[in-house]
Amino acid sequence: MLAEKFGRTYVTPWDARKSVSCMCDAGFRGPACEQRECPTFADPLGGLGNEAARDCSGRGLCDYETGRCRCFAGFVGSGCQAVDEGFGLR
């Protein structure tokens, strides 16, 4: 089973016993591996970021066509991993 390859076990969803799926190359995701992943890091304010599988450090939205983050106001960086010092969040 594909889930077992990744150390996951689940039994209740309808597809729990299915073994067909795509394994994407690094940097891609989606049902057919057609989406580009965005960079992500730890949340610059100490919340949940990449360790909780949140795109763009939990401080922006990922554009899966380009693989680039659109950071929320007050955050900067390729993965929204830094506070914009001029915005006054700290």
Image: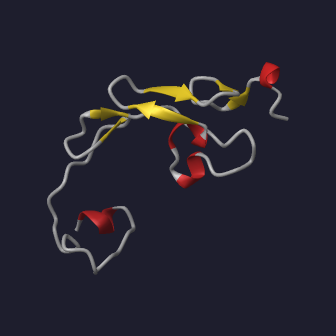
The image shows residue 29 at horizontal and vertical percentages of 32, 41
Q: Quadrant of residue 4?
A: bottom left
Q: Quadrant of residue 59?
A: top right
Query: Seen from this angle, which residue lies furthest top?
Result: 86
Q: Quadrant of residue 44?
A: top right
The quadrant of the picture occupied by the N terminus is: bottom left
Q: Is residue 65 left or right of residue 44?
A: left
In this picture the colour scheme is secondary structure
Q: Is residue 41 above or below residue 23?
A: above
Q: Residue at x 25, y 48 (%)?
A: 23
Q: Nearer the viewer, residue 9 or 67?
A: 67
Q: Is residue 21 left or right of residue 12?
A: left
The image shows residue 85 at horizontal and vertical percentages of 81, 23
Q: Residue at x 71, y 29 (%)?
A: 82
The quadrant of the picture occupied by the C terminus is: top right
Q: Is residue 40 above or below residue 12?
A: above
Q: Residue at x 24, y 34 (%)?
A: 34
The image shows residue 47 at horizontal and vertical percentages of 69, 50
Query: Seen from this angle, which residue lies furthest bottom?
Result: 11
Q: Nearer the viewer, residue 50 or 3?
A: 50
